[in-house]
Amino acid sequence: MSPIRLAIIGLGKIARDQHLPAIAATPGIELAAIASRNATLDGVPHFPTIEALLASSQAIDAVALCTPPQGRHAQAAAALEAGKHVLLEKPPGATVSELAPLIEVARRSGRTLFTTWHSRFAPAVEPARAFLAQHAIRSVTIEWKEDVRVWHPGQEWIWEPGGLGVFDPAINALSILTCILPRPVFVTGAHLAFPANRAAPVRAEVDLTDTAGVPIRAELDFLQTGPQTWDIRVETDGGSLTLSSGGAKLFHDGAPLIDEKEAEYAGIYRHFVDLIANGRSDVDATPLALVADAFLIGRRSVVEPFEY
């Protein structure tokens, strides 16, 4: 069977750091084109926009949308209407409601739509989910704190409406949370700190619970220097379970269970190939809905301006 011919739309940092190596390492899929306004890749056909790509004679079967979430709905809709499978980087869009029309277009066109949550493919996630399915959960604490200047250098879009600010990395924690907990969760309160010159928060505290009333607390920071923190700690009747380093490590009562190099994007592309082969889609808006709810009911405060 011929490999899936994939085009990357938006050749930015995440595409170069994660998507390109994962595509190269995944059987059944190959890079066939790039559509990017400001970047090219030696030896790969290049187009300035997805519209130019779709209007060309370049043979592709699927696209991976790695552009900022604002405006991504139109790109996904155009690709699906043109008969291409679509992989959406996280977050899958700037709003929750824009996903429903894409689901319908994918269904009507018989194409795969995949909303990727790369942190769900971290090595500690499935073992944690299995453990928590067997134990009573008492509380959950999330600490997701990183330096925006290191991980998102000069990325102004992340501070615009729809860019999510600190929730752009923190949505990874919510994607893990909603995967490993056995019951649905929802937001009960939040405090969002907005820099005076920005339209998205730089820090946040979010309170959630599940349908059994388990307290869940998330502390998020975009200005942490030094060691970075991407941890989820779950207290249970069977001890304390900690997913650390974004899900690369797992500890039970402080004893290490898993410490593996992350291969999240390889998992994404294996799943994408499998979805296409089986004529299925995989769309989950739950992490994005939790962020939207935090914006909807959260108290807001104005803090010092942010500059790169």
Image (cartoon, rainbow, N blue to C red):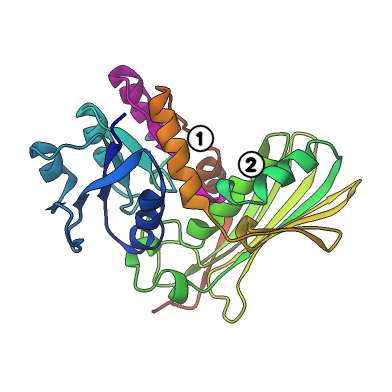
Choose between 63 and 199: the one closer to the eye.
Answer: 63
Q: Quadrant of the C terminus?
A: bottom left
Choose between 127 and 196: the one closer to the eye.
Answer: 127
113 is within the stretch colored magenta? yes
Number of other residues with Cα within 10 Å of mark 2, as a class: few under 14, some 14 to 19, many 20 or more = some
Please tell me whether residue 195 is drawn above or below residue 218 in the rendered image.
below
Q: Position of residue 139 (x, y in %)?
A: 81, 50
Q: Secondary structure at mark 1?
A: loop
Residue behind mark 2: 178
Mark 2 or 1, nearer chain start: 2
Instruction: Name the residue type under label 1.
Output: Asp
Q: Is residue 187 visible?
A: no
Q: How many marks?
A: 2
Q: Position of residue 124 (x, y in %)?
A: 67, 51
Classify residue 15 as left or right of residue 244.
left
Task: Tell me the number on the disc at residue 276.
Answer: none
Instruction: Name the residue type under label 2.
Output: Thr
104 is within the stretch colored magenta? yes
> From mark 2 to mark 1, how far is it between C-alphas?
10 Å
Q: Position of residue 237 (x, y in %)?
A: 91, 46
Residue behind mark 1: 284
Specify the principal SS of the magenta part: helix
Choose between 70 and 305: the one closer to the eye.
Answer: 70
- Magenta range: 99-119
Q: Position of residue 238 (x, y in %)?
A: 90, 47
Mark 2 touching mark 1, by CB under 8 A? Answer: yes
